[in-house]
Amino acid sequence: MIKTAPATTASARIRGAFSEGRLTWSGLALTGFSILVYLFLYAPIVILVLFSFTRDEFGVRWTGFTFDWYIRLFNNPRMMGAAWNTLVVATVSTIVSTIIGTLLAMAMERYRFRGRNAMEGLIYLPIVVPEIVMAVALLAFSAIVFDVIKMVTGETLRRNLTTVTIGHIAFSISFVVVVVRTSLKNFDRRLEEAAADLGADSWQTFWRITFPLILPGIIGGALLAFTLSLDDFIISLFLSGPGTSLLPVEVYNRVRRAVTPEINAISTLMLILSMALVALSQLLQRRR
Amino acid sequence: MSDSIAIELRDVVKRFGDVVAVDHVNLQIRDGEFFSMLGPSGCGKTSTLRMIAGFELPTAGSILIHGREMGLTPPHLRPVNTVFQSYALFPHMTVAQNVAFGLEMRKVPKAEIARQVKEALELVRLSGLEERRPRQLSGGQQQRVALARALVNHPEVLLLDEPLGALDQKLRKEMQLELKSLQARVGITFVFVTHDQEEALTMSDRIAVMNKGKLLQVGTPTEIYERPNCRFVADFIGETNFIDGVVIGRDGNYTVLETPEGLRFRGLATRPLSDGTQVTYSIRPEKVRLLAPNGELPPNGLAGTVMTVNYIGSDTRITVRINDRRTIDIWEQNTRSTLDRDEYWQPGEAAVIVCPPDNALVLSE
Amino acid sequence: MATIQQQQQRRDRIRLALLLTPGLLWLLLFFALPLVIIFVYSFMTNDALGRVVYEPTLNNYITIFTQSLYVNAYWRSIWTSVLTTVICLLIGYPLAVFIARSPQQWRMPLLMLILIPFWTNFLVRIYAWQIILANNGIINGFLEMIGVGRLTLLNTEGATLVGLIYGELPFMVLPLYAAIDRFDFTLMEAAADLGANKVQAFLRIMLPMTMPGIVAGSVLVFIPTLGQFVVSELLGGAKVDYLGNLIQRLFLRANPINWPLGSAMAVLMMLVLLVLIMMYFRVTSEEER
Ligand SMILES: Nc1ncnc2c1ncn2[C@@H]1O[C@H](COP(=O)(O)OP(=O)(O)OP(=O)(O)O)[C@@H](O)[C@H]1O
Ligand SMILES: [Mg+2]
C-alpha cells in the first residue's frame, strides 16, 4: 500500500486511533478486541483436536490421553469408505471443473461475443444461489433423469458418487473461473505477441508462454475447487445415495445421534488435510 | 546500401471502428537502412509496425516483405522480429532461454542454439548474465536482452517500437549510439518508431513523418529538416517562424508572397504555385540574420525592434518585433566568448533582420 | 479484403466455441435446467406417496403464505440472517481495521489466520461448538467449577447464532479487509484537520469509502445463512424450524415427501433473497453518495 505522507505538521500531530503506532487507548482496545476474535476463531478447533485424544467416551471432557479413537476410526469400514469416496469425488470434480473453468475463463477474458453478458450471469449465478436451492434442484433433476432412463432402458438407477460429483463440478466451475480470470487479467498479452513474433504458433505460444504464466492461477483455482468439494455438505447430502455417502454426510449422520470422540478424530484428520493443502498452495506460490 | 526494397506498404489502411489509425499509406523501406517513423502520439506509428509484424491485419491495402505479399501470414511465419516498447521479456525464463526461444521455435539443433545465444549476448554485451531472470536486470540490460532475442533470429527486418522510451535520458543517449553502431555491424534493416525528433534525426538513414494516420514526408534527416514539404513537418521537426500570406508572383527561383499587412517575403517553393494561393512562409530561427541598422534596408531585410534576448549557452535566442502583429525568432550562435553582455543586443534596440530566400520555404496548405 | 476478416473471424469463432461449449453445456444442464425444474415443480401437486403429480396449482404458494409454520420459518430465517450479518459486520470491521493498520509484514499472516479455520470443513467447525456448549462440556465444566452451576447452552437459538457467526465471519472479514486496505488513512487526518471529530470522520469519510467491502461481505454472509439448516439442527437442536430445515425435510425426510411444496419454498427463498439484496444495494449506494 502506498501512503501519502501527512501533508502538514498539524495533521501529523493529530494522530489518534488510526495512527500506525498503537500506543493509544483506542489502539489498545482494538488490539485486545482482535485478540479475542482470534481466540474465538481458534478455541473450538484447538479443543476439537485436543479432545480427539481424550479417554472420555463422549469426547467433551479431558479424562486422560488415548489413541483409541483413531484406531477405532481406521477399523471402521463405513468411515474409511466415506473418506475414500470424499477423496475420489473431490479429485474428479477438481480435475473436471478446473479444465472446464479454465476454458471458460479464457473465453470470457479473450473474446467479445453476443450473449457474453448472459454468460457472465450464468457463470456467477451459482456463487450467489443458496446451496440448498442448488441441491434440491439437482435432486429433482436427477430424479427426472432416472425416471426417463428407467422408461427407456428399464434400468433402475439410484443416486451415487457420479451425481454428487456432477453437482460439485457445477458449483466449482464458477469459482475456478473467477480465480483463473484474475490471473489472465494480470497476464501481459504482449508476451504472446512476442512469442508469435519469435516464430511460435498459437499452440506453442499457449503451452510455452501463457500456460506457465497463468499456472499459479489455475493451481489456485484447482485447490479452491478441491477444498470446496471436501468442505461441501449440503449438495453431498442431497445427491449422494445410500451406501455411497461422503465423509461430511457420515459425520452429520453420526453427530445427529451422539457425540463420540471418533468424530473428533476424523475431524482432526480432515483439519490436517486442509492445512496441508493451504501449506501446499502457499509453497507453490512462493516458488514462483 | 543496396537499392532493393525490404518492406513495401501499398495503400495501407487500418481502421479501429470509427478511428482511422492508418490512412492510405504508401511506403518503401530499403534493404539495410535505418528507417525511422516519427510522429506525435496516436498518429498510427505503432499500428503500422504491428501490421508489418502481423499482429494486426490491414483493413485495406497490402504489405510486402522482400516482394512477398504478406496477406494473412500470421506473425510467427513472417521474416521480421520485433523489439517491444516494454520489451515483453518472458518473466518465467532466464535471459538465455529468452534469447533461445526463437531458435527453438525454428528447431535449430541444441548445440547450434547454445553457440548462437552466446554470440548474440556477446553482441549486446550481456555475457555472464545468461542465468538471470528478466526482473533481476536493469532497464538497459532488459532492453539489450530484447534486442538479442530478436537479432539472434537474423530477421530480414527488425521492428523497434520506441525501444528507448522507458530509459532515462543518459542511458537513452548511450543506447542510441549503440543501436546505431549495432545496426551498421549486423546490416539488418531497422524500422524504428519514435516520437522524439532528435532521436530520429541522429540515428536514421531516412525518416518518415506521420500525422493523424497519414504519411506526410519521407526523406533523409537533412531533407526533412531543410526541405519540409508541409507546415506540419516544418513545425514538428525543429522550430521555425511561420508567416501566412498569398502568392503574388515569382522572382527567378523564388516565390514571392505578401502578408495581409503588405510585407513581402521570398522563398523556395517545393512545387509551382499559382498567384493567389494561400501559403505559409517558413524560416528557421538560426537561418535569420540580425544586423545593426545603417540607414538603408538590405535586400530581403526588414526593420524591427529587439524585444527579448535570452542567453542559453550555445546560442542566444532573440525575438524581434517587425510590426504590431508579428515577431520573428532568431537564434544566433555564441561564437565569441565574452562575459560582456553590454556589447550584445539589448531589448528596445532597433535592428534589421535579413531572411535569405535560399533558406526560406514557401509551403502550401 | 473482406475475406481476410472473414477467415480470421471463422477461426476465432471455432476457438471460442471450443472454449465455451463444455462450460456452457454443464452450467445449462446441471445448473440452469434444474432450477427451471423446481420452478415448474413449485406449481405442481403431490400425491399421498410423495410423487409429483403434473397438475398445475397455486396451492403450494397459498400453503406457504397461509400456514404459520411456513410464514414463521421465513421470518425466522430472514431475521436470523440479518442478525448474523450485522454481528459479523460489527466484529469484522474493527478486526479488518486492525489487520489493515498492522505493520506491513504482519498483515498477510494475520489474514491467513482468519482464513485457516475457513479451510476446515464447515460441519467440523460447527461440531466443535457442540463439544464446547454441551451440557457436560467445557463451558459448563468451568461454570460448575466457579460455582455458577450448569446452564443450558446447547440446543438454543443463541447457540445457533453463535455457530452461524463463527461459520461466516471469514466471509465478512476478507472483503472488508480488501476495502479498508485500499483506504488512505491520511484522509482521516485530513478530516480531523478540517474539524471533524472521530465519529464524524468515520461516518462521513471512512464508512462511505469502504462501503463496497461492507456490501460484498454482507451479501456473502447473508446468502448461505438464509438457507442454512445444519447449524440450527446441530446447535439449535432442531427445536424451531428455519427455511432450510423445512426444505430439507420436505425433500428428504417428510412422510410423505413433498417436492412441489419444497420447490415453492426454494423459489420463494430466491425471491426473498433477490428483493432483500436489491433493497440493500439501493440503501448502501445512497450511503455511498
Ligand atoms: N486496438 C485498438 N483499438 C482501437 N483503437 C486503436 C487500437 N490501436 C490503436 N488505436 C487507435 O489508433 C490510433 C493510432 O494508434 P497508434 O498506437 O498506432 O499510435 P502511435 O503513433 O503508436 O502513438 P504513440 O506514440 O502514443 O504510441 C490512435 O487513435 C489509437 O487510439
Ligand atoms: Mg505507439
Image (tube, coloured by chain):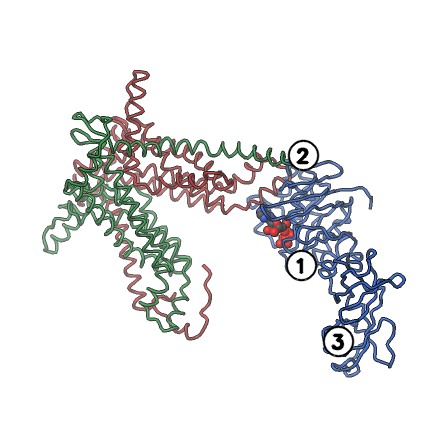
Q: How many marks?
A: 3
As shown in the figure, which amino acid type bears the numbered disc 1? Leu
SS state under label 1 = helix
SS type, badge 2: loop
* Chain of the residue that carries numbered disc 1 in the rendered image: B
Query: Who comes first in sequence, dot 2 or dot 1?
Result: 2
- Which residue is most to the top? A154
Identify the chain drawn in red: A
In the rendered structure, which disc, 3 or 1, sits on the residue that comes first in sequence? 1
Display colour for chain B = blue
**Mark 3 vs mark 2: in front:** 3
Amino acid type at image mark 2: Val
- On the image, numbered disc 3 is attached to which residue? B323
Query: How much space separates mark 3 and mark 2, taking CA atoms?
Result: 72 Å
Residue extending furthest toward the right: B252
Marked residue chain, label 2: B
**Residue picked out by circle 1:** B171
Quadrant that contains the N terminus of chain C: top right
